[in-house]
Image (spheres, grey):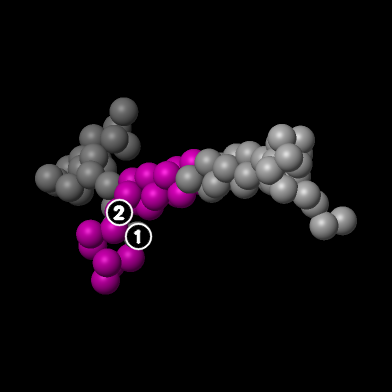
Amino acid sequence: MGESKRRKQVMGENYGKSEPIASWLPFITKDKADQFVKVSTQGAWYGIGAMVVIWITIRFIGPAFGWWQLAD
């Protein structure tokens, strides 16, 4: 608990706020960077899922219903 109190005294009103990634980019904080990684990872997984659905449709569903024929 002593370290926390010392850090609070040293940092003053900035205590508990997220630190910027770089001093020359004060508006991009570590919390915002973590949030960006989380959202972009989720978007990538949605894209992978959509690609699998499209591939299954092109490879199996379309030819099964006679919508088109495969060239192989």
Q: Are marks 1 and 2 in contact (CB under 8 Å)?
A: yes
**Label 1, label 2: how many angstroms apart (C-alpha)?**
5 Å
- Of residue 58 and residue 7, the one placed in the foreground of this image is 58
Residue at the spot x=78%, y=49% of the render?
69
Q: Give residue 50's position: percent from left, percent from top.
A: 57, 42
Q: Answer whether residue 29 is visible to the viewer in this image.
A: yes
Residue at the spot x=33%, y=46% of the render?
31
Residue at the spot x=38%, y=45% of the render?
35
Q: Residue furthest top?
A: 1
Q: Residue furthest bottom?
A: 24
Helix, strand, or loop for circle 1? strand
- Of residue 31 and residue 65, the one placed in the foreground of this image is 65
| Position above or below: 22 against 7 | below
Quadrant in which residue 57 is drawn: top right
**Residue 28 is a magenta residue:** yes
Which residue range is magenta in the image?
22-42
Please indicate whether residue 40 sits to the left or right of residue 26 in the image.
Answer: right
Give the class, few, some or many, for how many residues have Cα within 10 Å of label 2's Cα (few <14, many ≥20). Answer: some
Specify the amino acid type for callout 1.
Ile
Q: Which residue is mark 2?
A: 29
- Of residue 6 and residue 11, the one placed in the foreground of this image is 11
Quadrant in which residue 4 is drawn: top left
Residue at the spot x=82%, y=57% of the render?
71
Q: Answer whether residue 52 is visible to the viewer in this image.
A: no
Q: Quadrant of the C terminus?
A: bottom right
Q: Which residue is mark 1?
A: 21
Please indicate whether residue 28 sits to the left or right of residue 66 in the image.
Answer: left
Q: Give residue 36's position: percent from left, percent from top.
A: 39, 50
- Of residue 68 and residue 3, the one placed in the foreground of this image is 68
Specify the amino acid type for callout 2.
Thr
